[in-house]
Image (spheres, grey):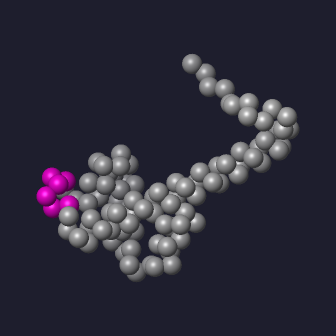
Amino acid sequence: MSVSPPDAEPMLGPDARLQKLYGELAELAGQRNAIDGRIVEIAAEIEHGGFWGHTGAKSVGALIAWKTGVSPGNARTIMAIAKRWEEFPICTAALRAGQL
């Protein structure tokens, strides 16, 4: 099965269409970054609140990997940020806003 691109704006030339697609990618990346920021924030709350102890997971990182479907390596990265969440208020605010 092949996937063909939508013909939403067939009148646009290749350069204009590419610029429009770049804009859409930037918007989606910002949304994704905001989601990642919220995941880190949730992981920090679970870690600092001690809520994970009765989940059956061996660590908060393992819990995050399990519940979000990310790789163990990405879960470790999430936890590295989550453990230091309060140390970087400007950075974490930007992450939540999807700016990073």
7 or 82: which is nearer to us? 7
Name the quarter where the N terminus is drawn. top right
Q: Quadrant of residue 52?
A: bottom left
Q: Along the horizontal axis of the image, is 2 left or right of 21? A: left
Residue 34 at x, y percent in the picture = 50, 60
Tag count in the figure? 0
83 or 16: which is nearer to us? 16
Q: Which residue occupies the extreme front position in the image? A: 8
Q: Along the horizontal axis of the image, is 83 left or right of 90? A: left
Q: Along the horizontal axis of the image, is 68 left or right of 8? A: left
| Residue 66 seen in the current view | yes
Q: Which stretch did the figure color magenta?
A: 52-57
Residue 97 at x, y percent in the picture = 53, 66
Which residue occupies 39% across, 74% down?
85
Which residue occupies 67% across, 48% down?
24
Residue 4 at x, y percent in the picture = 66, 26
Is 55 included in the stretch rendered in magenta? yes
75 or 94: which is nearer to us? 94
